[in-house]
Image (cartoon, rainbow, N blue to C red):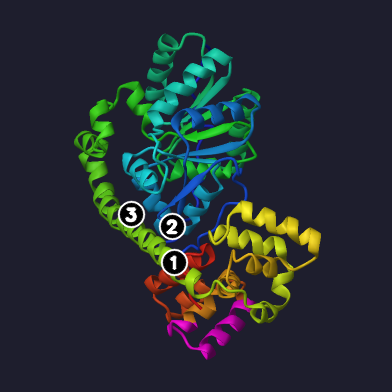
Amino acid sequence: MTITPINTKDAGFIDRPVSSIATVAPLIVNPDRPEAIPTKRILRNPVTAMEFEQQVTTIMQWAESRQSKAVCVANVHMLMEAYWRPEFAAVLRKAELVTPDGMPLVWMLRQLGMKTQDRVAGMDIFHALCERSRQQNLNIFFVGSTPQILDSMGAKLAQQYPGLNVVGMESLPFRPLTEQEDQELIAKIESSQANLVMVALGCPKQEYWIAQHKDKINAVMIGLGAVFAVYAGVHKHAPKWVQKSGLEWSYRLMQEPRRLFGRYSSTIPPFVWLAVKQLLTESIGDRRRDAYFESSTVKHSAPVMPAIEALGEQIEQAAMIGEILVKHRIITKTHLAQALQQQQQTGQKLGEILIQNQLVSALELEKSLKNQSIKLGQLLVRNQIISQELLEQTLQKQKRSHAKLGECLLQQGVVAPEQLENILLEQCWRRKGVWMVA
């Protein structure tokens, strides 16, 4: 195993300014995330819903072809940082993988439907990638921590994983890099032909560093936090039973009380509250939707053709309508395929076919379309949070500033963050078919 000398002068990370004002980020799906990688939202942030073996295999596939990918290893602290900082939430949304490191995230994923979800922890990822890289002759570059820790890691890796290609180790100082220093670091990693870059700068610095170097470094970059120090023996790794019980935070707190007490006391209680709130609201939403369908299918099962005509041009967009109805669980994919086949044969409108076949009522169809296109401003006025006049004035200001409507209203002080968050949640529910009201 070859290890390059550690140079603390030519390395570092670039700090990004972090706003102290927490704004509400809308729920959006990351268009850059491959569709084959399933995610679940926890506190508005995506967490990869795949088992450990699948996630490690995916990382190795990317690493073999030296694809520039970002992997965030998420725990409670990281999700709370993202909840409070919209710019950091954007970093997580753009990452290809956000693994559930902490057991609270695993428990949440199981409650959200991923019954077989296991923990995808940083230390386990570290060992799995080192072993598979040794077997497949891939190169690993380590970034961050201290020279002493990296030295200890190098010696231990040589003993535990003989033949592993460690092509570089760089300890980064606690200051921003100059442009020249950053370019030199990028060149050093690129010239090493690294397949994997493991980064230990602590959250959220390492995630910002990875995001800043995306598409500049052709390797899979993984933020591993305290893994370097634990592997080097500076800190002890919690026993398996402590990890599985979700009490690893208390084990770490006993080792570093001064550094970790403030973090844990400020992140764990709000996470528990927000997680319970999310599970309760989603459960209530499911019951409301089911109750609506049970009542509406009885009252509005007969075909009502005039209502279809009133929908106008929206009915012409058959594919879009079908997708909306399937997403709202009003019809199945099989029903949609049969209706589209009948449409090709008869030339009828899709909505007419669905109503004739008693697969959907006119009321359900109309409300689905209305809820899909409803805007934030409409909901704010409907809930009497702002007036129509104030909405129109703010929309004019928005055109000049190019800011989001929610941001403009928060800046004016006419809407509280809690009110905006609740309305965004209602908008999301409506578009998902949970909130089926006129």
Residue 416 lies, with reference to residue 189, above or below; the image says below
Going by the image, does 248 lie left or right of 101? left
Q: Main secondary structure of the magenta part?
A: helix
Residue 275, disc: 3
What percent of the width, then of the height, locates residue 322? 65, 61
Residue for badge 2 = 85
Kind of residue indicated by mark 2: Arg
- The residue at 32%/44% (across/down) is 104
Is residue 177 among what the camera can see? no
Q: Nearer the viewer, mark 3 or mark 2?
A: 3
Residue situated in front as seen by the camera: 147 or 191: 191
Kind of residue indicated by mark 3: Ala
Name the element at disc 3: helix
Look at the image and say whether residue 415 sits in the magenta stretch: no
Look at the image and say whether residue 382 sits in the magenta stretch: yes
Q: How far is disc 3 from disc 2 in space, using C-alphas?
A: 17 Å
Specify the quadrant of the image occupied by residue 360. Answer: bottom right
Residue at the bottom extreme? 389
* Disc with the residue nearer the chain's start (2 vs 1): 2
Q: Which residues are magenta?
A: 381-400
Q: How far is disc 3 from disc 1 in space, using C-alphas?
A: 29 Å
Label 2: few (<14), some (14–19) or many (≥20) C-alpha neighbours in 10 Å: some
Q: Are marks 3 and 2 in contact (CB under 8 Å)?
A: no
Is residue 120 among what the camera can see? yes
Label 1: few (<14), some (14–19) or many (≥20) C-alpha neighbours in 10 Å: few
